[in-house]
């Protein structure tokens, strides 16, 4: 069925608001997302002259179209989780955990190692979430780092790193949205103005090194610290005769062939530049990498009789089966985003508000940051948000006297988009981070939200400074000082509450 977008004004805000509110109130994501999609389809159907009988067909048409649009993502996730499951059954994860455990003796070292690995895998945020979670979860469990903390570190080193990495699918996506032949140069210029990404990375390392947690995360960490040794590793499978190479080699093969796959699919070997090639169809390349990881695991495990062929196939099937629950969330969130972006004009409604604002130009960066954050949070997509806002921002900054605000405004757009995506319960990255950490999705959202929002508030102050000075170099150190001070103050308050028994009862 061919959908035609109609503008529904303020009604276009209702579906994401309904879905997010229900998810936070009921702590049940599946029905909340489905009701959000249904409400959007009701608005679309009734506003377009349809009736109640067209709502269900429209809903399932949207869901099937989103499955088709994201087919490579579904294949990649299925293959990746097959590799993940096989690595676990081979004993490779246990062997790696024992090897690393001898070297990582403290929670600080474990958190730092997780953060560093998250930064090193910067090609794609979804790949980052699942790979880092798979590799580090057994180690952080043994060090009694909470699954909520692991999910936060994974999430905070996924999109915030990808959005400032020049060689990533994100860089190409942003550059392609700028109506300028020097779009990639413009993207590079926005990096110092992408305050949220930079401050989030700073916060991850401050939290990792100091252990200064606060809010719901403090409670989660105290609960994790109170677990017995048996509880900390209760989900481990029986001891196998696997070796570290049984974990490392399939993962390394997956990474290398994923990069080569993205380059191949994008035409790098036919003369296309590497940065453009990996952004052409990254999930197709990632699927090739995951398949290569699967083949590597087969060649590594079967000849050494770590598994029988039948066990290997059963491992693939059970691995694919384990991704079905989070995949259902992804399909519903894609459908909700499709309703908002393609049918009822949520993005257009918010974008029109930005373009018609008559505020002083110095306030443009902070205004755009807030609008992009709300838009991304409500739709659960950073790509969709900056894809809608960047053309509007470039038109606004073509006005006389506004040219100097183009780069700061674009930086604020990207930062706000990542913040909203970072903490939205319907975001792909948020879902994949909780999946990779094997953490309850709503728990991840609840514990991450105060951390992400603290950084966002600090960034808003930074954009006020940058808007007045048209430069990031005063705002950045001011933000860093403000952020670190706030972390220490809030953690001290949470520690006092814990001593008084308000944070957690063990």
Image (cartoon, helix red, strand yellow):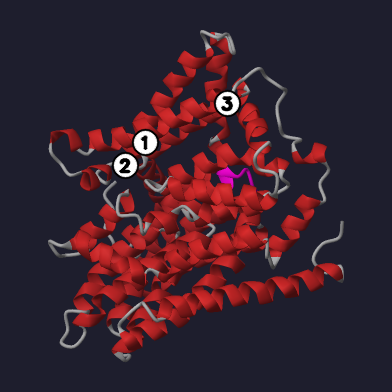
Q: Residue 314: say if magenta.
A: no
Closer to viewer: mark 1 or mark 3: 3
Q: Could you tell me how far apart the alpha carbons at marks 1 and 3 are, in whole angstroms?
A: 23 Å
Q: Is the residue marked by circle 3 packed among few (<14), some (14-19), or many (20+) residues within 10 Å?
A: some
Q: Is the residue marked by circle 2 packed among few (<14), some (14-19), or many (20+) residues within 10 Å?
A: many
The front one of 353 and 392 is 392
The residue tagged with tag 3: helix, strand or loop? loop
What mark, if any, has residue 251 been given in the picture? none
Which residue is depicted at the point 29% across and 46% down?
A: 1
Residue 205's place in the image compared with 268, above or below, is below
The front one of 354 and 53 is 354
Q: Indicate the quadrant where residue 294 lies.
A: top left
Q: Tell me where the magenta segment starts and ends, as one range.
A: 434-440
The front one of 248 and 310 is 248
Of the image marks 2 and 3, the number of the one nearer the N terminus: 3
What mark, if any, has residue 244 been given in the picture? 3
Residue at the disc numbered 2: 282
Q: Could you tell me how far apart the alpha carbons at marks 2 and 3 are, in whole angstroms?
A: 29 Å
Percent from the top left, x then y, of residue 197? 43, 64
Q: Residue 438: say if magenta.
A: yes
User: From this viewpoint, is residue 398 visible?
Assistant: yes
Q: Could you tell me how far apart the alpha carbons at marks 1 and 2 are, in whole angstroms?
A: 6 Å
Mark 1–mark 3 contact, CB under 8 Å? no
Percent from the top left, x then y, of residue 227? 81, 46
Query: Which quarter of the figure is the C terminus placed in?
Result: bottom right
Residue 413's place in the image compared with 61, above or below, is below
User: From this viewpoint, is residue 320 visible?
Assistant: no
Which residue is depicted at the point 43% across and 80% down?
A: 462
Of the image marks 1 and 3, the number of the one nearer the N terminus: 3
The residue tagged with tag 2: helix, strand or loop? helix
What mark, if any, has residue 286 been given in the picture? 1
């Amino acid at each position: 069925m061919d959908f035609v977008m109609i503008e529904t004004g303020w009604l276009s805000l209702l579906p994401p608001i309904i879905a997010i509110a229900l998810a936070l109130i009921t702590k049940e994501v599946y029905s909340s997302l489905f009701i959000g999609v249904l409400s959007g389809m009701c608005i679309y159907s009734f506003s377009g002259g349809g009736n109640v009988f067209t709502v269900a067909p429209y809903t399932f048409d949207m869901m099937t179209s989103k499955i088709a649009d994201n087919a490579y993502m579904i294949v990649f996730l299925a293959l990746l989780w097959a590799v993940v499951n096989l690595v676990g059954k081979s004993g490779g994860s246990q062997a790696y955990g024992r090897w690393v455990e001898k070297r990582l003796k403290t929670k600080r070292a474990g958190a730092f190692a997780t953060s560093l690995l998250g930064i090193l895998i910067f090609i794609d945020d979804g790949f980052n979430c699942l790979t880092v979670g798979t590799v580090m979860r057994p180690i952080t469990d043994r060090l009694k780092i909470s699954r909520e903390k692991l999910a936060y570190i994974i999430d905070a080193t996924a999109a915030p790193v990808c959005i400032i990495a020049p060689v990533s699918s994100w860089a190409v996506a942003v550059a392609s949205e700028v109506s300028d032949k020097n779009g990639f140069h413009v993207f590079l210029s926005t990096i110092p103005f992408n305050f949220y990404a930079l401050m989030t990375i700073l916060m991850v390392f401050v939290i990792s090194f100091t252990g200064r947690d606060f809010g719901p995360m403090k409670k989660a960490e105290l609960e994790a610290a109170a677990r017995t040794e048996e509880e900390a590793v209760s989900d481990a499978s029986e001891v196998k005769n696997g070796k570290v190479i049984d974990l490392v080699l399939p993962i390394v093969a997956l990474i290398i062939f994923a990069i080569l796959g993205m380059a191949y699919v994008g035409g790098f070997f036919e003369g296309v530049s590497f940065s453009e090639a990996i952004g052409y169809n990254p999930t197709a390349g990632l699927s090739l990498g995951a398949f290569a990881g699967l083949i590597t695991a087969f060649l590594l495990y079967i000849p050494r009789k770590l598994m029988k062929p039948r066990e290997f196939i059963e491992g693939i099937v059970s691995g694919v089966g384990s991704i079905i629950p989070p995949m259902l969330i992804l399909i519903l969130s894609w459908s909700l985003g499709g309703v908002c972006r393609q049918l009822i004009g949520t993005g257009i409604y918010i974008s029109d508000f930005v373009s018609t604002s008559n505020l002083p130009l110095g306030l443009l960066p902070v205004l755009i940051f807030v609008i992009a954050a709300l838009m991304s949070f409500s739709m659960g997509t950073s790509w969709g948000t900056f894809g809608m806002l960047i053309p509007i921002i470039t038109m606004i900054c073509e006005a006389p006297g506004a040219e100097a605000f183009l780069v700061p405004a674009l930086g604020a757009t990207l930062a706000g988009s990542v913040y909203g995506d970072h903490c939205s319960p319907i975001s792909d990255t948020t879902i994949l981070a909780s999946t990779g950490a094997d953490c309850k999705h709503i728990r991840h959202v609840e514990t991450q939200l105060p951390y992400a929002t603290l950084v966002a508030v600090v960034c808003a102050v930074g954009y006020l400074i940058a808007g007045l000075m048209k430069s990031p170099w005063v705002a950045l150190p001011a933000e860093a000082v403000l952020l670190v001070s706030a972390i220490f103050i809030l953690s001290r308050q949470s520690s006092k509450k814990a001593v008084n028994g308000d944070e957690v009862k063990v």
